[in-house]
Amino acid sequence: ILNVEQSPQSLHVQEGDSTNFTCSFPSSNFYALHWYRWETAKSPEALFVMTLNGDEKKKGRISATLNTKEGYSYLYIKGSQPEDSATYLCAYTTINDYKLSFGAGTTVTVRA
Amino acid sequence: DAGVTQSPTHLIKTRGQQVTLRCSPKSGHDTVSWYQQALGQGPQFIFQYYEEEERQRGNFPDRFSGHQFPNYSSELNVNALLLGDSALYLCASSWGTFLNTEAFFGQGTRLTVV
């Protein structure tokens, strides 16, 4: 994989259901993987920064895992709530970089 | 803490004009990066400033230039505007590099070129 890819592009979830989505990235020269939540009319907000293969991080009902050898990360939302509706962006950076390379995001809509 | 602030929030310019966007980083942060987000895409890296110098640049033409001031605030300048420059411009700040620390983003400046 040459760039960051996120799938699916969008998903609709019933309130109370759990969901997950994927971020794929180039595995060579990996240094860190970032997840951001971006609500409409607000700033992107950092959720997690992960650097180690096998990293698992959790913040409330949201958690993330990282596999640097195969180049993917999963974001999980447990018991989705309407306030979880947002676009979730992942971005990676390499050991040679000062920039974040972003995916196009997964837009989550939670229906009450 | 005011976080990252950007100004203006919206502006409309005509093709060929020049524009300046401004960013004040989060208190304590010394590094500012600029990103462009076109419709349907993820943010694309324009450049990063640290210690008043451009440290890295993305694939953007020379029409895009920037500056960082001693107080760490930053400006993004775009000359000879094209219709394709219409986008949301995001500023992100951090302490040091982004490599293993989170970036803090502003709400962005929505630029429309007509």
Image: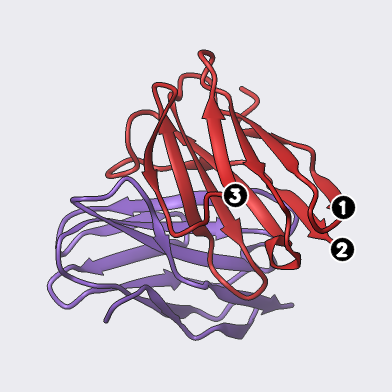
Chain colours: A purple, B red
Instruction: Say the numbered circle drawn on residue B63.
Output: 3
**Which amino acid type corresponds to the residue marked 2 in the rendered image?**
Val
**Would you place residue A10 above or below residue A89 in this image?**
below
Quarter of the N terminus of chain A within the rendering: bottom left
**Which amino acid type corresponds to the residue marked 1 in the rendered image?**
Ile
> Mark 2, chain letter?
B
> Mark 1, chain letter?
B
**Which amino acid type corresponds to the residue marked 3 in the rendered image?**
Arg
Q: Which residue is mark 1?
A: B12
Residue A45 percent across, percent down from the top left: 54, 49
Does residue B4 appear left or right of residue B19 in this picture? Answer: left
Decide: few, some or many residues near mark 1? Use Cα within 10 Å; few <14, some 14-19, many ≥20.
Answer: few
Residue A19 percent across, percent down from the top left: 48, 80
Q: Is residue B98 or residue B86 the one in the foreground?
A: B86
Q: Disc 3 vs disc 1: which is toward the camera?
A: 3
Q: Disc 1 vs disc 2: which is toward the camera?
A: 2
Label 2, secondary structure: give it: loop
At a point 36% along the width and 43% down the height, the residue shown is: B56
Q: CA distance from mark 3 to mark 2?
A: 17 Å
**Would you place residue A1 above or below residue A104 in this image?**
below
At a point 49% along the width and 51% down the height, the residue shown is: B46
Instruction: Say the numbered circle drawn on residue B114.
Output: 2
Residues under numbered marks 1 and 2 in contact, where contact means CB atoms less than 8 Å apart: yes
**Would you place residue B41 above or below residue A93 in this image?**
below
Rendered image quadrant of residue B3: top right
Badges 1 and 2, same chain? yes
Q: Is residue A109 or residue B81 the one in the foreground?
A: B81
**Would you place residue B98 above or below residue A20 in this image?**
above
Q: CA distance from mark 1 to mark 2?
A: 7 Å
Of the residues under marks 3 and 2, which one precedes in the sequence?
Answer: 3
At a point 61% along the width and 65% down the height, the residue shown is: A84
